[in-house]
C-alpha cells in the first residue's frame, strides 16, 4: 500500500466525529434510528493545514463537521446556512489542529494508553447506555465505523485526557479562601426562596370574549368566593365543585410555588395573600382567580459547607479552561503551522485567531526525462499522463506529446497542451501522475508514476528549510520504478500562519 493511502487512512480514523461528541453520547441519542439519507457531496480535495510534518485535508474537515452540518441544515437556509457552516468549519479546523498538537505532546512525554484502560472505557460506555457489545457494534456499523476504529478513537481521547491532566489539571488548584470569597460575592445565589403551598378556584376568560361572557365568569368567581368563605367551608371541596381550571380534580392544588414560577399577576396575588388566607376574586390576563394559601415555607440561607464542593468544581473548571487555553497557545507558538483554509465567515470565538489565510500550491509540469531510448516500434514516441488514484480508471488524461532528442519532453512541447493538462493546483495527496507511452493501434503502455503526497512532503520540507517563504522553485521527482523523471515548477502563494496569541491580531 502506498504511503499516502496509509496516511490518509490513519487521518480519517483519527478525526471521525471525535470533536462533536463522544460516540457513547451519540449512541444513546441515536440508537435504533435509521441514518438520514443525504446526497453525495463532490469534494475538490486539497490540503488545508499543516501541523509540523502532518497535514489536514479538506475532506477530513468535512467529515469532522458532518454531524453538526446535518443539524444546521434542519435549522437554517440559504446564505445564513452557508455562513453557519463556514463558522463551524473554522472552529472544527481549530479543534483538529489542537488534537494534533496534543497527540504530539503526548508522544514527547512518552505517554500511552493500555488495552486495559480501553476495555474499562468501553465497559463504562456499555453500562451508561444500558447496552451490550453487540448493540454497540450494530450502532457503530450504522455510522460507518468498526469497533476497532472506535477503540482507536477512545485511545486517542484517553491519551489526550492524560496529557491535559498532567500539563493542565496538575497545575490548577483552588484554595479554601477562594471558595469563601466566591460565596460571599454571590450570596444572593445561595438563598432558598420562600415557597407557598397554594390552591385556586379558576374561571378562564378566552381572548375575544364578549362583555357578557366576562361578566358571567366574574359572577361565578364571586359565588365560589362566598362559598369558600363560609364558616367551616373546605376550600378544596369548593374548588372540586366549582372551579373550571385544570387543577379542579386535585382540589385546585397548584403545589409549592416560588417567585418566578408563575406569571406576574398571579405571583402578586399569591405572595400578597397571608398564610391560611383566601384572596378575593381577581382578574388576570387569563381569567378570574380565587387563591388560598395553605402554607408558607420561609426562605433561608444555604450555608457554605453545603455548597463548597460545587463552588470548588466551578472555580476549578474556570481555572482549568483558562490554563488549557494558555497551554494550547504555547503549543501553537512552538509548532510549525500553516493554514490554507479561507472561509467566507464572520469571526467566531475561537481559542486561536485566524488571519485571512490562504495557501495555493501548484505543480506545473515543465519537463519529462525518460530512461533509455525515446524511440518506439512505429516511429517517434508520443507520451501522455493521467491524474488520479487508480491507474486503470484515472480522473483524466492529457493530450499526447512527442518525445524529443535525448529521450526527453521539453517545456515548449508541454506548453502546447491545454493548461489543465499540465497544471496541478492544490492536488489530492492520494493522487498520482501516471506516465504512459502511446503506441499506435495498441493500448497505452504504462511507464511509471509519481505520488503527490511524496511531492508535497518533499516540497514542505524544502520550504521549511528555507523559512517557509512563499514563491516558486523547480523540483524534479523520479517515478516509483525509476523509469522517468518529471520536472515541475512548484509555486505557493499567500502562505500565512495561524495567530497563536489573539493579541497579535491588533498588531
Image: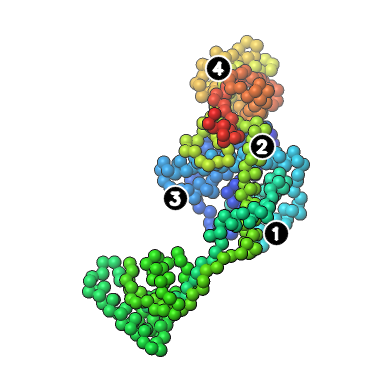
Q: Is residue 38 above or below residue 128?
A: above
Mark 4 and mark 3: Cα distance apart in space: 50 Å
- Quadrant of the image containing the C terminus: top right
Badge 4 or badge 2: first in the primary sequence: 2
Q: Nearer the viewer, residue 89 or 62?
A: 89
Q: Which residue is mark 3?
A: 75
Residue 465 horizontal/vertical position (percent): 68, 23
Q: Measure the C-alpha gap from mark 4 to mark 1.
A: 61 Å
State the SS at label 3: helix
Can you identify the residue that label 2 sits on? 331
- Label 4 sits on residue: 414
* Earlier sequence position, callout 4 versus callout 3: 3
Q: Quadrant of residue 375?
A: top right
Label 3 crowd bin: few (<14), some (14–19), many (20+), radius 10 Å: few
Which quarter of the figure has residue 448? top right
Query: What is the total number of numbered labels drawn onto the structure image?
Result: 4
- The quarter of the image holding the N terminus is top right
For marks 4 and 2, give the CA distance. Answer: 45 Å
Which residue is painted at 30% across and 69% down in the image? 206
- Comparing labels 4 and 3, the label whose residue is closer to the camera: 3
Q: How is the image coloured?
A: rainbow
- Callout 2: SS: helix
Report the Cα–Cα distance between label 1 and label 3. Answer: 35 Å
Q: Earlier in the sequence, mark 1 or mark 3?
A: 3
Q: Is residue 147 above or below residue 355?
A: below
Q: Marks 3 and 2: which is nearer the front?
A: 2
Compared with 152, 379 (above or below) is: above
The residue that mark 1 highlights is 123
Amino acid at each position: 500500500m502506498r504511503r499516502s493511502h496509509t496516511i490518509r487512512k490513519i487521518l480519517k480514523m483519527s478525526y471521525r466525529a471525535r470533536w462533536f461528541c463522544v460516540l457513547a453520547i451519540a449512541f444513546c441519542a441515536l440508537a435504533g434510528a435509521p441514518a438520514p439519507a443525504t446526497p453525495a457531496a463532490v469534494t475538490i480535495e486539497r490540503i488545508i493545514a499543516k501541523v509540523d510534518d502532518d497535514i489536514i485535508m479538506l475532506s477530513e474537515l468535512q467529515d469532522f463537521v458532518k454531524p453538526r452540518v446535518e443539524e444546521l441544515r434542519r435549522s437554517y437556509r440559504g446564505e445564513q446556512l452557508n455562513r453557519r457552516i463556514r463558522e463551524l468549519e473554522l472552529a472544527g479546523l481549530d479543534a483538529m489542529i489542537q488534537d494534533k498538537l496534543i497527540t504530539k505532546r503526548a508522544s514527547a512525554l512518552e505517554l500511552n494508553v493500555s488495552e486495559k484502560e480501553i476495555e474499562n472505557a468501553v465497559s463504562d460506555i456499555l453500562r451508561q447506555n444500558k447496552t451490550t457489545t453487540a448493540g454497540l457494534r450494530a450502532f457503530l456499523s450504522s455510522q460507518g465505523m468498526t469497533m476497532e476504529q472506535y477503540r482507536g478513537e477512545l485511545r486517542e481521547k484517553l491519551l489526550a485526557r492524560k496529557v491535559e491532566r498532567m500539563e493542565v489539571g496538575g497545575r490548577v488548584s483552588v484554595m479554601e479562601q477562594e471558595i469563601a470569597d466566591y460565596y460571599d460575592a454571590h450570596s444572593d445565589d445561595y438563598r432558598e426562596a420562600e415557597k407557598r403551598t397554594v390552591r385556586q378556584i379558576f374561571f378562564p376568560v378566552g381572548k375575544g370574549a364578549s362583555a357578557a361572557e366576562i361578566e358571567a365568569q366574574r359572577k361565578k368567581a364571586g359565588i365560589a368566593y362566598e362559598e369558600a368563605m363560609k364558616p367551616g367551608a373546605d376550600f378544596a371541596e369548593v374548588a372540586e365543585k366549582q372551579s373550571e381550571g385544570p387543577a379542579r380534580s386535585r382540589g385546585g392544588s397548584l403545589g409549592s410555588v416560588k417567585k418566578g414560577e408563575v406569571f406576574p399577576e398571579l405571583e402578586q396575588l399569591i405572595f400578597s395573600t397571608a398564610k391560611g388566607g383566601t384572596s378575593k376574586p381577581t382578574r388576570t390576563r387569563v381569567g378570574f382567580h380565587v387563591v388560598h394559601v395553605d402554607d408558607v415555607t420561609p426562605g433561608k440561607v444555604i450555608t457554605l459547607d453545603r455548597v463548597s464542593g460545587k463552588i470548588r468544581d466551578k472555580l476549578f473548571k474556570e481555572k482549568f479552561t483558562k490554563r488549557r487555553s494558555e497551554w494550547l497557545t504555547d503549543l501553537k507558538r512552538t509548532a510549525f503551522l500553516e493554514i490554507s483554509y479561507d472561509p467566507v465567515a464572520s469571526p467566531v470565538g475561537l481559542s486561536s485567531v485566524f488571519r485571512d489565510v490562504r495557501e495555493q500550491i501548484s505543480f506545473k509540469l515543465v519537463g519529462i526525462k525518460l530512461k533509455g531510448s525515446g524511440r518506439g516500434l512505429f516511429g517517434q514516441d508520443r507520451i501522455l499522463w493521467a491524474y488520479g488514484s487508480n491507474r486503470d480508471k484515472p480522473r483524466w488524461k492529457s493530450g499526447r506529446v512527442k518525445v524529443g532528442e535525448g529521450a526527453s519532453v521539453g517545456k515548449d512541447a508541454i506548453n502546447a497542451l491545454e493548461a489543465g493538462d499540465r497544471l496541478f493546483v492544490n492536488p489530492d495527496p492520494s493522487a498520482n501522475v501516471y506516465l504512459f507511452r502511446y503506441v499506435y493501434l495498441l493500448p497505452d503502455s504504462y511507464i511509471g508514476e509519481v505520488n503527490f503526497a511524496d511531492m508535497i512532503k518533499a516540497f514542505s520540507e524544502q520550504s521549511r528549510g528555507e523559512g517557509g517563504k512563499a514563491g516558486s522553485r523547480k523540483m524534479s521527482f523520479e517515478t516509483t520504478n525509476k523509469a522517468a523523471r518529471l520536472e515541475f515548477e512548484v509555486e505557493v502563494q499567500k502562505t500565512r500562519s495561524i495567530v497563536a496569541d489573539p493579541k497579535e491580531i491588533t498588531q
